[in-house]
Image (spheres, rainbow, N blue to C red):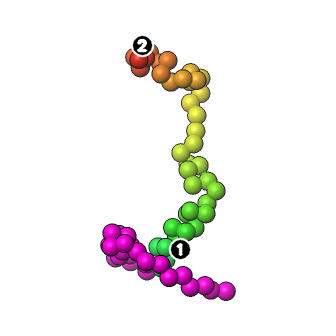
């Protein structure tokens, strides 16, 4: 099933969307669909999450980085 959605874009949003479409050779609709899929992703920032082995709990305790 297909649904139609009509939205009003600001001039800046329209310029951005047109520029991305022209640069990538994709339709504006395809770009919007991609952005909607990205917004739904439960792990949008998952690739940024990590840890440092044996790091102090408070990184400000590292030598050379103390504020006191």
- Picture quadrant of residue 63: top left
The residue sitting at 33% across, 69% down in the picture is 12
Q: Is 5 in the magenta?
A: yes
Q: Do the residues under discs 2 and 1 have CB atoms within 8 angstroms?
A: no
Q: Which residue is mark 1?
A: 33
Q: Is residue 25 above or below residue 68?
A: below
Q: Position of residue 62 (x, y in %)?
A: 47, 18
Q: Is residue 21 above or below residue 40?
A: below
- Which-is-in-front pick, marks 2 and 1? 2
Which of these two is toward me, 47 or 31?
A: 31
Label 2 Cα crowd, 10 Å radius (few <14 / some 14-19 / many 20+): few
Q: Is residue 66 visible?
A: yes
Label 1 SS? helix
Find residue 14 and report its horizontal and vertical position in percent. 36, 74
Query: Looking at the rendering, in which quadrant would you find the N terminus?
Result: bottom right
Q: Report crowding for label 1: few under 14, some 14 to 19, many 20 or more residues within 10 A (C-alpha).
A: few
Give whichever of 11, 17 is nearer the camera: 11
**Is 44 displayed left or right of 24 in the figure?**
right
Residue at 61% x, 85% y: name it.
Answer: 3
Where residue 47 appears, x then y in whole percent? 56, 48
| Sequence-earlier tag: 2 or 1 | 1
Q: Mark 2 to mark 1: distance in Å?
A: 50 Å
In the rendered image, the quadrant that contains the C terminus is top left
Q: Nearer the viewer, residue 5 or 30?
A: 5
First to last magenta residue range:
1-28
Residue 11's place in the image compared with 63, above or below, is below
Total number of numbered labels?
Answer: 2
Indicate yes or no whether the magenta region holds residue 31: no
Q: Circle 2 is placed at which residue position?
A: 68
Q: Secondary structure at mark 2?
A: loop
């Amino acid at each position: 099933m297909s649904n139609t959605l009509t939205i009003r874009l600001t001039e800046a949003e329209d310029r951005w969307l047109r520029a991305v479409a022209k640069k990538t050779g994709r339709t504006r609709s395809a770009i919007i669909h991609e952005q909607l899929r990205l917004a739904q992703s439960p792990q949008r920032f998952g690739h940024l999450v990590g840890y440092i082995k044996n790091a102090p709990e408070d990184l400000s305790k590292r030598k050379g980085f103390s504020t006191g």
